[in-house]
Image: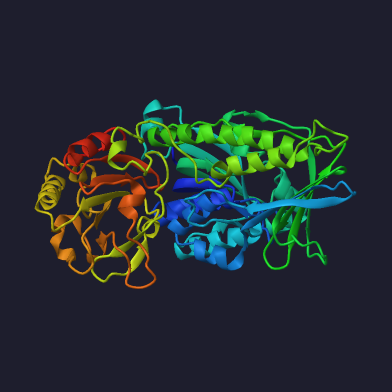
Amino acid sequence: MSHSGTADGIKESRVDVLIIGAGPAGLMCANGLAKAGVNVRIIDKRPEAIPAGQADGIQPRTIEVLQSYGLAERLLQEGNQMHMTAFYNPSSSGGIERTGRAADVTAPTARYPFEVTLHQGAIERIFLDSLAQSGVSVDRPVHPVALELSDDPKELLDPQSYSVKVTLKRLSETHAASIPVEQHVNTPLNSPPTDDSDETEVVWAKYVVGADGAHSWVRKMLGFTMDGEQTDYAWGVVDTIPETNFPDIRNRTAIHSNNGSCMVIPREGDTVRLYVQLSDVELKAGRLDKSKSCAEQVMEYEDERRKYAQDLIDFDKKFSALFSGKPRTEDNADGVSHEEFLEVFQTFGQFTSGIGIHYQESAIVNSSGQQHAKSLTVGQRLIPSIVLRAADCRPYQIQDLTPSDTRFKLIIFCGDLKDAGQRKKLDSFARELDSEAGFVKKFTPEGAPFDSVFDILTIGMTKKETCDYTEVPQRLRSHWSKVLIDDVSLHHGLGGKTYETYGISSNGAVVVIRPDGYVGVITSLDESAQHLGAYFSRFLHSDK
């Protein structure tokens, strides 16, 4: 595909990744790429970011992910936390009565055992401010009008080739002002007609990400369909600041009545969102995107996520039927009982919170060494736990030591450094890592720092009173802060249970945490270098 300039002088540019759509999904993608040093550009047809409204619920696992990018603190400061759920059902004397309360989040290992509610405009601002620190801003109002893929197979397979051509239109100020606000939010990206005052640009990209919503222009251009399920239930949404004596107005509350159902969602400040069941309304189907990617590693990730996307559709269908159905009463024995609704609510708590996601065996998930850390499930996220930094006994949450910085984390559980047998195994592992034939040097780009692809942490069982961080081989401690111990803190009794929590014996183990925070593989400390080399060779490519 030719990249030469156009005869009519149309502006052309190049970018590694072009993201179309600056909602939360597009902004989060842009933020992750920007932090990884990728040349990224994000466009949106809206002249301005939305100030408020739209989606507002953040689940516990999402909070953990945001924390891995350093964004959770602001979310927690600005948002509302939902800790309790109340349940109301028809009363025998008329009206409704509370039939129970329960924890809103039932996942036992959740680091943040609550949901956060904050309007979408504020959530987007968190990402926008983070992007600004990387010198990236949303280009608006800009929308695509054409997308072409190279017809050269070699270009399509070359990750360094700018094989996607996207033609953009920058809406003039007068044109953008003439488009109704509702068109900026609720219609497909190709809806705004162009006029002579709009500026045209051609962008050559290595990759294009379609984050342009349910009516995706990108999906339409690539010929992908949306397949999914639909229900016959309709809901109205009202954001309000209520004056009420309803005792559970600041709890998440599920109300079943003979006249329909209602969900109360407390929001930031004094705001409350009400989801009210409606009748006689025709609904459009919600669907699952079936688009595919050419990149091998992205395909693995897409295959993992697809199962849970389908599970989410199935759960939503079941939960919607339960919540929207008529409640069980003396006159309606076939209705939904409180016990039935509560059981589903609690049973699926691991799933809805995002905590229970378990990726199955694949090139990037290898559970053959699960026995070495019996309670740290391969394919699931790294379980939160407190460890101490060996050099100064400062307690740290282990998730905060494994941020989303594109690197694989090698967590070496070395046992007691004072044990001669364990020290011998650790020294041997360090020598293998440092060898020219080892996987670290094999997959680290020429001239790049030793820890640019693999970040190494060592966690020992030696007590704080006798441990010296300098006992760990130099190759396994790129910085003094990389040596940790599983012991109780000097104050407040924090930590000391990581080996026990993960099911790791005093013989130790090596745990690989993928860049997305999920456990990829676990090996013994004795044979770890060989097994890890085989694991990484399944999906990483070396230029040496």
Give the x, y percent position of residue 261. Answer: 80, 45
Q: Is residue 180 left or right of residue 520?
A: right
Q: Is residue 141 left or right of residue 127?
A: right
Give the x, y percent position of residue 525. Answer: 19, 44
Give the x, y percent position of residue 434. Answer: 13, 48
Determine if residue 26 is in view. Answer: yes
Front residue of 124 and 221: 124
Determine if residue 9 is in view. Answer: no
Q: Which residue occupies 63% across, 32% down?
A: 314
Q: Is residue 339 above or below residue 228?
A: below
Tell me the quarter of the picture where residue 230 sits: top right
Q: Which residue occupies 49% across, 52% down?
A: 110
Q: Which residue occupies 20% across, 59% down?
A: 477
Label count reads: 0
Front residue of 194 and 434: 434
Front residue of 206 and 399: 399
Q: Is residue 107 left or right of residue 172?
A: left
Give the x, y percent position of residue 529. Answer: 18, 41
Its colouring scheme is: rainbow
Image quarter where the C terminus lies is: top left
Image quarter where the N terminus lies is: top left
Tell me the quarter of the picture where residue 161 sits: top left
Front residue of 120 and 340: 340
